[in-house]
């Protein structure tokens, strides 16, 4: 079954995109705080 | 290495090849061989994407970078999550719904055959040559660690990849990637735990990290804006964004990983796995390097981590110079240890300054020793940092874990090379052989040609790898040359989906103009991370102008016909 369309293909995925950006912002902040904490 | 460690290395390598060969079952059709019949679950495709990017150079070079330079390299990856989001929204649906084998095949659907062939050729040229480096760079380091010559080590890395990729196709590549990623992450976590437990009783983890922080090794974010500086938050976010989009969106070695996913939904999720986990994984790799630095504050390190080079210098007429350096190194090491104890006991600006001076003195002595090695061995590209982590593994980890980490490094190279061979073979057969030489042959014929193409690229990469150390700076030139193409190829894809009236002539001229523009800008010392932005902009601007001009020309000549490539497909 070549590349069968998945019923979930059109499922909203935007929440993942937002979550990726939130996770990155948190990671960058954590890295910044890490360098400040152990200075 | 201890026989137990050798047994682990041989046993795991044999299991990986055997399991890859097992996956030959059912691979009698081209779509099965190259795309696993689009049946791979999202998490396996996602781990394969991550494994392809994480090569042995990451395990050796990045830990070495963490040891000598700290966490700042992490900024290189800051644009990656954003790139994954953009690709999931833009290129991935186009590739997946177009039912293509290669990313470049889509360009023929959208533009014309010459655009497809040009971009695929650029991919083959740059990837084909870089394959050799993926083998040779770790082979040089691992040959010292394993006590073998470079050629034998290159074969240990390359031959298993060739065998399971030729016979198992993309199924073998993907499922091998999954196993290797588990091995690598498990090994790194075990190393971190042992490093933390290995600190002296009088020194806590926080004290050790504080010493690393005093030297600036924990400074992960640099807010300075300088286009000639490679590792800043801005180069990472902007340059890293375009580099990642180029790598994951226009490089067949990555595109093929997520084209094997069982649905568009799964393909998107496989990319988002990297979006979530790539930065934490790289933090882990760099943290290992930083912790190794902390470990060697309290446990005397060798002056040089490459013992073979050290022995060579000791047998040369510069042995006296080396001994004098060793004495300076020992006394400076003691001074740094005393300064470290002082910082741990009384954390004052004075004690920190004393520690920084002692650390800088030690670095200077090591620099002189490395220069001596370069002069005696003639190896001008020698970088002692690459030997730090492998030497730590061999001298400080317990028996068993040594074998596990050694095989993890070897397999990190093996799985990257396997993905490259698989994609090179796909582009060769689909974009050239099937397109031009034999368009209507049977699947069995294409499958046979694909296996031969994989074997050819494997042999080609091995030959380049063996000669790479002799080629020296030529390889660097080739790699640099390859980096000129990334942004330009990505620019064509953005032109395809972003400008409805773009045509094949505009796209082809755009690629050539983009590559030329990147080559010119690179001459002014601009960091390579920004070159991808230049490439994308160069292709899009030129592509749009040429497309519009050719449309006007046709309209003026009275044909009144629409460009064949217009319209968003």
Image (cartoon, coloured by chain):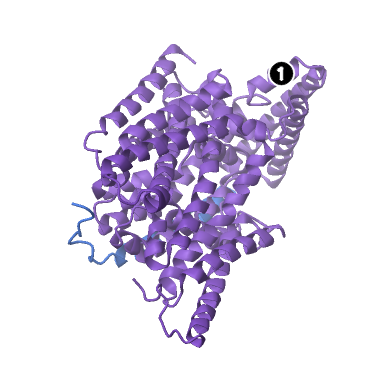
Chain colours: A blue, B purple
> Of B364 and B452, which appears nearest the observer?
B452
What is the count of numbered marks? Answer: 1
On the question of residue B192 being in view, the answer is no
* Relative to B516, B14 lies left or right: left
The answer to whether residue B553 is above or below residue B86 is: below
* Quadrant position of residue B520: bottom right
Q: Residue at x 67, y 36 (%)?
A: B472
Q: Chain of mark 1?
A: B
Q: Residue at x 61, y 31 (%)?
A: B467
Q: Position of residue B164 (x, y in %)?
A: 35, 31
On the question of residue A5 being in view, the answer is yes
The answer to whether residue B337 is above or below residue B484 is: above
Q: Position of residue B190 (x, y in %)?
A: 41, 31
The answer to whether residue B482 is above or below residue B25 is: below
Q: Quadrant of the C terminus of chain B?
A: bottom left
> Of B15 and B539, which appears nearest the observer?
B539
Q: Position of residue B265 (x, y in %)?
A: 26, 58
* Quadrant position of residue B30: top left
* Relative to A36, B44 lies left or right: left
Q: Where is mark 1, residue-wise?
A: B312
Q: Residues within 10 Å of mark 1 (few under 14, many from 20)?
A: some
Q: Residue furthest top?
A: B3
């Amino acid at each position: 079954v070549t590349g069968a369309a998945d019923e979930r293909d059109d499922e909203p995925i935007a929440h993942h995109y937002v979550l990726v950006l939130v996770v990155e912002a948190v990671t960058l902040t954590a890295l910044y705080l890490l360098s400040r904490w152990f200075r | 290495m201890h026989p137990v460690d050798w047994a682990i290395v041989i046993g795991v390598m044999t299991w990986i090849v055997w399991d890859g060969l097992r996956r030959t079952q059912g691979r009698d059709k081209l779509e099965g061989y190259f795309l696993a019949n689009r049946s791979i679950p999202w998490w396996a495709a996602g781990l394969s994407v991550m494994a392809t990017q994480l090569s042995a150079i990451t395990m050796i070079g990045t830990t070495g970078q963490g040891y000598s330079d700290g966490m700042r390299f992490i900024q290189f990856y800051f644009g990656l999550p954003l790139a994954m989001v953009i690709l999931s929204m833009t290129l991935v649906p186009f590739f997946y719904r177009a039912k293509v084998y290669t990313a470049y095949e889509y360009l023929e659907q959208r533009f014309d055959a010459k655009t497809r062939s040009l971009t695929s050729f650029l991919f083959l040229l740059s990837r084909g040559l870089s394959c050799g480096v993926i083998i040779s760079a770790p082979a040089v380091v691992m040959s010292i660690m394993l006590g073998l010559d470079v050629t034998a080590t290159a074969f240990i890395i390359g031959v298993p990849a060739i065998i399971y990729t030729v016979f198992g196709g993309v199924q073998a590549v993907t499922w091998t990637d999954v196993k290797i990623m588990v091995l690598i992450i498990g090994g790194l976590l075990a190393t971190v735990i042992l490093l933390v437990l290995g600190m002296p009783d009088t020194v806590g983890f926080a004290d050790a990290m504080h010493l690393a922080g005093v030297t600036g090794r924990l400074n992960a974010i640099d807010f300075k804006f300088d286009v000639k500086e490679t590792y800043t938050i801005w180069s990472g976010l902007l340059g890293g964004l375009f580099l990642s989009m180029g790598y994951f969106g226009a490089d067949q070695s990555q595109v093929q990983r997520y084209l094997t996913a069982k649905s568009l939904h799964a393909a998107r999720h496989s990319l988002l796995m990297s979006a979530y986990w790539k930065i934490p994984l790289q933090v882990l790799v760099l943290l290992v390097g930083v912790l190794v630095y902390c470990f060697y504050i309290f446990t005397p390190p060798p002056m040089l981590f490459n013992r073979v080079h050290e022995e060579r210098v000791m047998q040369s007429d510069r042995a006296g110079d080396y001994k004098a350096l060793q004495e300076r190194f020992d006394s400076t090491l003691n001074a740094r240890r005393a300064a470290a104890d002082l910082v741990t006991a009384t954390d004052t600006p004075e004690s920190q300054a004393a520690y920084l001076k002692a650390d800088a003195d030690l670095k200077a002595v090591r620099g002189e020793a490395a220069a001596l090695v370069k002069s005696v061995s003639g190896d001008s590209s020698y970088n002692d940092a690459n030997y730090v982590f492998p030497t730590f593994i061999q001298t400080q980890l317990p028996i068993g874990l040594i074998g596990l980490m050694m095989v993890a490094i070897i397999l990190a190279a093996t799985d990257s090379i396997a993905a490259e061979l698989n994609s090179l073979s796909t582009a060769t057969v689909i974009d050239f052989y099937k397109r031009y030489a034999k368009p209507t042959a049977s699947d069995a014929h294409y499958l046979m040609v694909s296996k031969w193409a994989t074997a050819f690229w494997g042999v080609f990469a091995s030959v380049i790898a063996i000669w790479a150390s002799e080629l020296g700076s030529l390889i660097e030139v080739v790699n640099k040359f390859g980096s000129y193409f990334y942004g330009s190829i990505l620019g064509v894809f953005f032109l395809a989906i972003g400008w409805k009236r773009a045509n094949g002539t505009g796209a082809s001229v755009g690629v050539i103009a983009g590559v030329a523009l990147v080559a010119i800008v690179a001459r002014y010392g601009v960091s390579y991370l920004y070159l991808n932005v230049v490439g994308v902009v160069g292709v899009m601007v030129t592509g749009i102008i040429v497309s519009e001009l050719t449309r006007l020309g046709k309209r003026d000549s009275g044909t009144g016909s629409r460009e064949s490539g217009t319209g968003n497909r």
